[in-house]
Amino acid sequence: MTATDLHRLTGAYALHALPDGEREAFERHLAGCEACAQETAELAATAARLGLAASVTPSAALREQVLRRITTVRQEGPDGSARSGSGRTRLRARLLSRWTLAACLAAAVLGGTTVWQHQRAEDALGRAHRAEQGADEIAAVLAAPDARTQAAELAGGATGTVVVSRDLDRAVFLVSGMASPPGGKVYQLWFDDAGAMRSAGLMDPARADQAVLMRGPVDSASGMGITVEPSGGSKQPTSAPLALMTFPA
């Protein structure tokens, strides 16, 4: 494999799509190629954000709800004064920002994927802020210069990859094709501290593909595990591990 060929592997490496031989060759190349290191970091961060995207299908009644609520929002002219059309009732002001209304209209009329309802706007904003913060933290781990990855085959044909940054003291677990847990159960992640398991958070039981920022510092953990636990999680594992993975050196 030539140096030119190696330069072209940044995307496949960022998506963990290289066979072992090519991955090892590219990692040796990566250690001495600043351009590839930068491009790989940027692609990994982008892939993390794309992996976190989720779509929501608007309900059939949403369009009518939005159109009905529009009649309760006062129309304002450029000078901020209220307008009233011929034969129309003067419209009362509501605590609904213009961007929220626009998002609702886009979702209801154009079939957009993200739905914002004005009576839940504050809650939605809070969730969006937390999701964005989580995405930034995941992207930071994946793009860290010292990030190292370890992949494994999981039960049912699923694949899992753990990415560890010792400098940031954080880890991210990415999984693809994970089967739904049994009813009333959830997958829980654990740090392996010399055989003692420390909770690292829960996976979303409704998503087969996801990226999870493992909760808490990596610290001295040498690996991780996945177990099936009651909804809400457990303080200690209550089932045999579905998988045990050693953290990359």
Image (tube, rainbow, N blue to C red):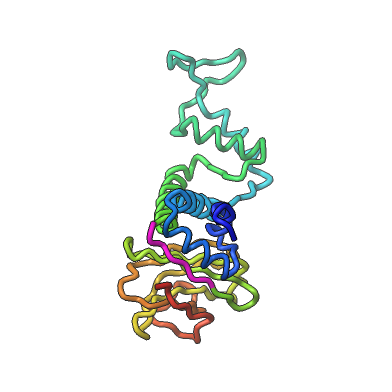
Please say if 158 is above or below 81: below
Residue depicted at 58% across the width and 57% down the height: 2
Q: In the image, residue 120 lies at what x, y percent?
A: 48, 45
Residue farthest toward the right in the current orientation of the protein: 60
In magenta stretch: residue 232? no
| Location of the C terminus (image quadrant) | bottom left
**Residue 127 at least partly seen:** no
Disc tally is 0
Q: In the rendered structure, which segment of residues is drawn in magenta? A: 145-151
Above or below for 146 versus 186: above
In this orientation, which residue lies closer to the viewer: 93 or 209?
Answer: 209
Q: Classify residue 153 as left or right of residue 223.
A: right
Task: Residue 137: tell me if it is visible.
Answer: yes
Query: Is residue 233 positioned above or below 100 on the image?
Result: below
Q: Residue 150 lies in magenta, yes or no? A: yes
Residue 180 in the image, given as x and y percentages of width and height: 61, 71
Q: Where residue 32 appears, x then y in whole percent?
A: 42, 57
The one nearer the camera, 61 or 171, is 171
Q: Does residue 147 appear to the left or right of 66 in the view shown?
A: left
Tell me residue 170's x, y (percent): 36, 64
Q: Which quadrant holds residue 139?
A: bottom left
Which residue is depicted at the point 50% across and 24% down?
74
